[in-house]
Image (spheres, rainbow, N blue to C red):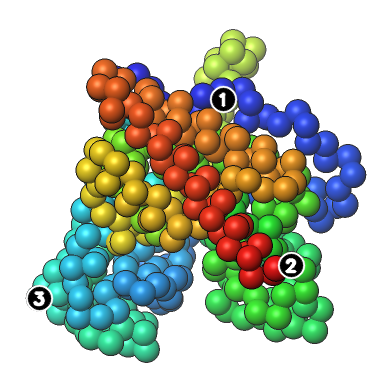
């Protein structure tokens, strides 16, 4: 099985973008939200750090402790099947990303599932989790899913986003809001509805629309290509509809060391000390957070059949993912370029995944793309009739 990377990795460097006309704040955001960005992590928290809610949806609420590498999603209702589906789809999609060695979109590691009847023992071993969950989970104890935590982006990102996009009279309140301590940036490649002066401001799920990305001169074509390959893998390798999955920029931890370059060892006196000046081993290591594009939330994902019915299901599911997927038939050149990057990468990746299949199956990825075009054309026709 060959490695399924971007069709043209070198094109991740977008030569059409010039940062020379960006202001200092926009230039810093451009750097921090780019894939190569690395920021030192603060020191690890103590073991008794409280659980805090870092996310919530219809299926569950997500809790984490500062400094811990895992997050716990608790079911908010008595429908524990939704969280189990989240678990098995998450695990299966992770497996296929690994088989194809695709790492340009990152999936949180899927650790383990806790059934609701094991919930009391689980909560006993995690003091404080029940107290944190009580206001949002209707049934406790409940089922749980433990996964890798997507680290928040550096605090500087949140500060810059507030300065640029938050309404002036609520900036101070937004800076002081504990809920805005953690920042994940949802990548809305299919929307140009982003505005400045926002009256409701949440950094935990900050919606970065395509027009925002263009304003910051982010490499939107690289983002679109990555989303295209990820969608192709979820459709044609994992054989799912990818319903309601989300794409977000978040952090991933990496540990580096201050080891001396081996080529320079010959120039030092034999037997010399080569460690940190403090003589503390922990000072030899440096933990950094790297900006990554993540895919998350698999609770609504369903299997598809390898036929036209499966394509129709995938097209319908894509309407739920609407803001994340680029749109066809748009007026601006930027939107058309982003759609082209997505569609080409999707089809080319799907053809690699499905190589060796018969012609009927090989035609399905293009039918999916055509389905998105047909849906958008019908939406535009309906809007035209309404305005007329």
- 95 left or right, relative to 333: left
Residue 306 seen: yes
- Residue 164: image x %, image y %? 78, 65
Residue position for label 3:
117
Q: Residue at x 42, y 28 (%)?
A: 349
Coordinates of residue 3 in the picture (x, y in percent) = 38, 22
**Does residue 318 sit above or below 13 in this rendering?**
below
Question: Which residue is located at x 32 percent, y 52 percent?
Answer: 313
Tell which circle, 3 or 2, labels the residue nearer the N-terminal end.
Answer: 3
- Eye-nearest disc, 3 or 2: 2
Give the labeled residue for mark 2. Answer: 195
SS for callout 2: loop
Asked whether residue 102 is in view, the answer is: no
Query: Which circle's residue, 1 or 3, is located before the other in the chain?
Result: 1
Mark 3 to mark 2 CA distance (whole Å): 46 Å
Q: SS for tag 3?
A: helix
Mark 2 residue crowding within 10 angstroms, few (<14) / some (14–19) / many (20+) = few
Q: Nearer the viewer, mark 1 or mark 3?
A: 1
Which secondary structure lies at badge 1? helix
Give the vertical position of 335 relative to 62 (above or below): above
Residue ID for mark 1: 9
């Amino acid at each position: 099985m060959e490695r399924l990377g971007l069709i043209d990795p070198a094109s991740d460097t977008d030569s059409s973008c010039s940062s020379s006309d960006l202001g200092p704040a926009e230039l810093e955001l451009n750097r921090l939200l780019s894939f190569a960005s690395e920021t030192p992590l603060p020191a690890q928290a103590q073991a008794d750090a409280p659980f805090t809610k870092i996310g919530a949806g219809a299926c569950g609420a997500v809790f984490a402790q500062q400094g811990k590498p895992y997050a716990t999603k608790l079911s908010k209702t008595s429908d524990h099947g939704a969280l189990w589906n989240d678990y098995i789809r998450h695990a299966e999609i992770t497996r296929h990303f690994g088989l194809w060695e695709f790492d340009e979109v990152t999936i949180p590691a899927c650790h383990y599932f806790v059934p609701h009847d094991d919930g009391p023992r689980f909560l006993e071993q995690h003091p404080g989790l029940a107290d944190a969950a009580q206001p949002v989970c209707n049934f406790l104890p409940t089922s749980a899913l433990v996964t890798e935590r997507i680290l928040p982006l550096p605090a500087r990102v949140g500060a810059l986003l507030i300065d640029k996009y938050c309404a002036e009279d609520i900036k101070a309140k937004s800076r002081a809001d504990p809920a805005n301590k953690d920042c994940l940036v949802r990548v809305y490649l299919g929307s140009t509805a982003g505005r400045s002066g926002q009256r409701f401001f949440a950094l935990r799920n900050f919606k970065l629309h395509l027009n925002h990305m263009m304003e910051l001169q982010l490499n939107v074509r690289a983002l679109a290509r990555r989303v295209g390959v990820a969608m192709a893998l979820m459709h044609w390798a994992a054989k799912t509809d990818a319903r309601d999955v989300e794409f977000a920029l978040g952090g991933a931890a990496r540990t580096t060391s201050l080891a001396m370059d081996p080529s320079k060892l010959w120039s030092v006196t034999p037997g010399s000390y080569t460690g940190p000046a403090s003589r503390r081993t922990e000072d030899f290591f440096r933990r950094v957070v790297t900006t990554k594009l993540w895919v998350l939330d698999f609770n609504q994902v369903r299997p598809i059949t390898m036929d036209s019915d499966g394509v129709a299901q995938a097209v319908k599911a894509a309407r739920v993912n609407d803001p994340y997927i680029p749109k066809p038939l748009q007026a601006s050149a930027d939107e058309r370029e982003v759609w082209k990057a997505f569609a080409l990468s999707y089809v080319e990746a799907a053809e690699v995944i499905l190589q060796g299949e018969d012609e009927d199956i090989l035609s399905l990825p293009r039918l999916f793309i055509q389905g998105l075009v047909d849906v958008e054309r019908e939406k535009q026709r309906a809007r035209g009739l309404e305005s007329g």
